Amino acid sequence: MAIDSTAIIHESAKIHKGAKILASAVIGANVEIGSGTVVDSHAVIAGPTKIGKNNHIYSFASIGGDPQDITYQDGQESNLVIGDDNLIREFCTINRGTEKENSLTRIGSNNMLMSYVHIAHDCQLGDHIIMSNNASLAGHVRISDWAILGGFVLVKQFCNIGRHTYAGMGSQINKDIPDYMVAAGVHPKIRSINTIGMKRRGFSASSIASIKRAFKVVYRDSQGRLLDQALNELEASDSDSIEVMQFVECIRNSRVGIMRGPADDG
């Protein structure tokens, strides 16, 4: 264990012998830090927070702070869990969960959170996510694996960002982005499928073609037809496509409704 003599470590903190805590970092009560994790100088980690292996938390990040929720009171159960191999850059803020939703904020593994990213209470992030500088999540947001959020993206509470999606810089997101879609614009709409991202991650040509067809059914040919009818059509015609069924499930599970598409351009 390498802990700088100027670091402030609470007596209840559990730090693996393979972790590294640099100068003037502050590790609070009920914090666990796994092997290989590096906490840079002047970072602050409050608990209850559990951090896995091989993460790098850069200077001035504030991790595990109290939820910014007016109903939260001291003494309520409130936790943060962070997985393995994450990069959490300078001035990121990640808040613990509230009793409104399992008292847990969770960050998966292999994510990159660039400088000044904010993740509010009760958010749930998967793996391999990139959040660019100043992207911010309100409470209860869910982001699935391999999503990318451009700089200054804002996400309203309870929205879901699907797997393998891309949200362009400055988007103000107040509806769900279904799996495999690209959203862009200050008042964003679904523009296309994430063809480039899918190719980079090794999806087959047939899988990409299936998602293109699904996009067309929901977003291009749906005028005058109920969304449920479009989803029923996809379930009947593409039940053998894992990607299309994920796309359909993502839409059916929406809590706030899905983002409009190009057919709605006036």
Image (spheres, rainbow, N blue to C red):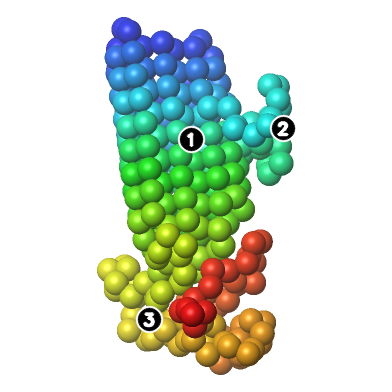
Q: For residue 116, say whether it is visible.
A: yes
**Could you tell me the amino acid type at mark 1?**
Ile
- Local crowd at mark 3 within 10 Å, few (<14), some, or many (≥20)? many
Residue at 66% over, 85% down: 226
- Horizontal relation, residue 37 to residue 9: left or right: left
107 to 259, vertically: above or below: above
Q: Nearer the viewer, mark 2 or mark 3?
A: 2
Residue hosting label 3: 208
Label 2, secondary structure: give it.
loop
Q: Earlier in the sequence, mark 1 or mark 2?
A: 2
Q: Quadrant of residue 196?
A: bottom left
Mark 3: secondary structure? helix
Check the image and name the residue furthest to the top: 5
Identify the amino acid type marked 3. Answer: Ile
- Residue 111 in view (yes/no): no
Q: On the image, numbered disc 1 is attached to which residue?
A: 94
Disc 1 is placed on an element classified as: strand
Label of residue 71 in the image:
2
* Residue pictured at 40% horizontal, 76% vertical: 192
Q: Amino acid at mark 2?
A: Thr
Disc 2 to disc 3, how far (Cα)? 44 Å
The residue carrying pointer 1 sits among few (fewer than 14), some (14 to 19) or many (20 or more) residues within 10 Å by Cα, namely: many
Q: Nearer the viewer, mark 1 or mark 3?
A: 1
Quadrant, the N terminus: top left
Looking at the image, residue 262 lies above or below residue 176: below
Q: Residues within 10 Å of mark 2 (few under 14, many from 20)?
A: few
User: Residue 105 or 4: which is nearer the viewer?
Assistant: 105
Q: Residue at x 56, y 62 (%)?
A: 175
Instruction: Please state if 151 lies on the left or on the right of 219 as rendered.
Output: left
Q: Is residue 158 left or right of residue 40?
A: right
Tell whether label 3 touches label 2 (CB within 8 Å). no
Compare marks 2 and 3 and give the one earlier in the sequence: 2
